[in-house]
Image (cartoon, helix red, strand yellow):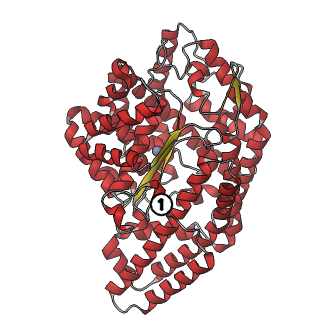
């Protein structure tokens, strides 16, 4: 690791990562393999492991920076070319990496690694080696290409609303307006964008499903689902558990969600809530932060320092070292995420502020990811730096609830309304989250289905989990196209149930923080420091939380949320 990163954090402008030369990396790998074979004792073998780990951190930093630079300006031909080069060589780097993993897993000395680094590491590698064969290199490049096409298509959206042109992030304030007609026009503009590009959205996904299915078959899976789970490193739960969990959502969460929808409708004086009304938590409008980008960034320090002084200091470092990009700009990719440069030991937060309460939500959420990354940056294996997603989202979503008591910093007198909306939105999110998951299981089980059948699959899951949903004259959404707005479906298959599993854990932190705030935060920070050194269920247990898969967990969460919301 870069020495300056160890204490203070490095400034973004000082992060330089050379584009790797695949031939040279291949030579590095050959030497690593030879040194491993030649090593006569455990310390020498562990030294080889450490050299390899440093190489992986360097390559990961280059990948993160190249993707980030493209997302910051998808219209730059230079950045796009770098991103395309990455898409092309990444499978070759993965090939070298899995070859090394295979060698170590098959080695008579694998126990040296297990003793020093834990058995979880070897399980992660086993998932990696069964997810890759050199025969799928071209397929992986094709897949990344298609994912970039989706990013560009979404980033290029220009929606006309009341004489203005905005992108998909910029439409959101209109979509949350207390003026019902304006909310409706905003959603019509969104739906029209998706309708206008319907063929493109269908073609990209159709090709993604085909190429993913083809890779799965080459790797010996019957369809992509099994491979998708492996790629997500799910080593401690399977499809059957996920299916049961979705059932629990139907039983315990959907009834509560219906009550929230009903109450929002009553407050608006509507007999039936349309889709464009769902996001409004109060007739006077959603609580909004009381200042602009710079003000929100400044207030973040005060709010997060109250969660814990260490978290406040960390946040200050992120701002001072310019490890954030939160402004919405034309040509910038949508969404928000946290990435990291493990070679330098610092995270980076990317988002698109639009003046709504979502700005505070995304800031706090991504800072939770970033704080975990920072706390666990010195773990001894690259594979442990980022946990599997369902664990990683606990850090981000729990930060939302641990910081909830300090929302006065952003919303002043509206903070209480923000907290109420936050909890209501959590309940409404769970059924939507499992819909996205269930849909993908249906899609990959029938790769031969065409676009029209996939749209029907989405309608089927919507009817099950979101029975209140009414799209009215938003034609593209009404005929089953709503899922196309969700980038995870295109970019990271099966990444969505993770948010709901993590939310179930974050809500447990919320309950505990109201009983004993200090203890909850102590457990949270300890969990962040563990990074991904264990699988989901182990991490959850170590933080004194119940597994969302256990009978009763979701029911308890639903009852605590229901009581707080007055149902
Ligand atoms: Zn997240």
Q: Is residue 114 above or below residue 498?
A: below
Closer-to-camera residue (150/504)? 150
Extreme residue in the top direction: 269
Residue 306 % position (x, y): 26, 36
Residue at horizontal 32%, vertical 25%? Answer: 408
Give whichever of 236, 112 is nearer the camera: 112
Q: Left or right: where does residue 316 sit relative to residue 469?
A: left
Name the residue beneath numbered marker 1.
Answer: 15
Q: Badge 1: how crowded within 10 Å, few (<14), some, or many (20+)?
A: some
Quadrant in the picture for residue 176: top right
**Residue 353 percent coordinates (x, y):** 52, 34
Q: Is residue 45 left or right of residue 475?
A: left
Position in image of residue 484 (x %, y %): 67, 39
In the image shown, does 446 or 349 lie closer to the viewer?
349
Quarter of the figure with the C terminus:
top left
Q: Identify the residue at horizontal 49%, vertical 75% (top origin).
A: 101
The answer to whether residue 527 is left or right of residue 130 is left
Q: Secondary structure at mark 1?
A: loop
- On the image, the x and y values in percent for residue 8 come to 32, 57
Instruction: Note whether residue 140 is visible.
Output: no
**Toward which corner of the image does residue 455 lie, by quadrant?**
top right
Whether residue 361 appears in this view of the structure is yes
Can you say whether 499 is above or below 233 in the image?
A: above
Q: How many marks?
A: 1
């Amino acid at each position: 690791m870069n020495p300056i990163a160890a204490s203070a954090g490095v400034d973004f402008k000082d992060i330089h990562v050379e584009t790797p030369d695949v031939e040279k990396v291949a030579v590095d790998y050959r030497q690593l393999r030879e040194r491993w074979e030649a090593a006569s004792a455990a310390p020498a073998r562990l030294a080889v492991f450490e050299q390899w780990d440093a190489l992986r951190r360097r390559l990961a930093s280059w990948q993160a920076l190249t993707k980030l630079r493209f997302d910051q300006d998808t219209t730059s031909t230079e950045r796009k070319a770098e991103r395309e080069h990455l898409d092309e060589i990444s499978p070759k780097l993965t090939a070298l990496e899995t070859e090394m993993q295979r060698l170590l897993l098959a080695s008579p000395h694998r126990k040296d690694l297990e003793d020093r680094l834990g058995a979880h590491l070897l399980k992660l590698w086993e998932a990696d080696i069964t997810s890759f064969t050199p025969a799928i290199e071209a397929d992986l490049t094709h897949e990344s290409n298609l994912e970039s096409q989706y990013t560009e298509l979404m980033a290029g959206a220009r929606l006309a609303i009341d004489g203005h042109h905005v992108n998909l992030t910029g439409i959101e304030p209109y979509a949350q307006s207390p003026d019902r007609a304006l909310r409706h026009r905003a959603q019509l503009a969104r739906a029209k964008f998706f309708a206008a590009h319907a063929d493109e959205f269908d073609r990209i996904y159709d090709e993604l499903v085909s190429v993913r299915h083809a890779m799965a078959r080459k790797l010996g899976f019957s369809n992509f689902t099994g491979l998708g789970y492996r790629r997500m490193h799910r080593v401690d739960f399977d499809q059957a558990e996920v299916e049961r969990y979705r059932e629990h959502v139907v039983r315990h969460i959907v009834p509560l969600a219906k009550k929230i929808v009903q109450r929002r409708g009553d407050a608006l004086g509507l007999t039936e809530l349309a889709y464009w009304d769902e996001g409004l938590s109060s007739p006077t409008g959603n609580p909004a932060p009381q200042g602009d980008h710079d003000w929100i960034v400044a207030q973040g320090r005060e709010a997060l320092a109250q969660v814990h002084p260490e978290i406040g200091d960390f946040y200050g470092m992120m701002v001072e070292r310019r490890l954030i990009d939160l402004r919405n700009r034309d040509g910038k990719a949508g969404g928000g995420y946290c990435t990291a440069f493990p070679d330098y030991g610092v995270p980076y937060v990317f988002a698109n502020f639009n003046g709504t309460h979502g700005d505070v939500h995304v800031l706090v959420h991504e800072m939770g990811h970033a704080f975990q990354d920072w706390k666990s940056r010195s773990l001894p294996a690259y594979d442990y730096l980022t946990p599997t997603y369902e664990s990683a989202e606990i850090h981000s979503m729990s930060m939302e609830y641990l910081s909830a008591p300090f929302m006065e910093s952003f919303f002043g007198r509206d903070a209480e309304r923000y907290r109420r909306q936050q909890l209501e939105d959590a309940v409404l999110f769970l059924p939507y989250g499992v819909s996205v998951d269930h849909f993908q299981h249906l899609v990959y089980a029938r790769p031969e289905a065409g676009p029209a059948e996939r749209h029907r699959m989405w309608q089927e899951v919507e009817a099950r989990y979101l029975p209140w949903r009414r799209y009215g004259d938003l034609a593209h959404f009404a005929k089953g196209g709503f899922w196309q707005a969700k980038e995870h479906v295109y970019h990271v298959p099966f990444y969505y149930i993770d948010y709901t599993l993590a939310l179930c854990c974050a809500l447990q932190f919320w309950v505990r923080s109201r009983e004993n705030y200090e203890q909850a935060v102590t457990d949270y920070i300890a969990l962040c420091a563990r990074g991904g050194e264990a699988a989901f269920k182990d991490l959850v247990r170590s933080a004194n939380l119940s597994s969302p898969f256990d009978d009763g967990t979701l029911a308890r969460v639903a009852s605590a949320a229901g009581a707080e919301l007055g149902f």
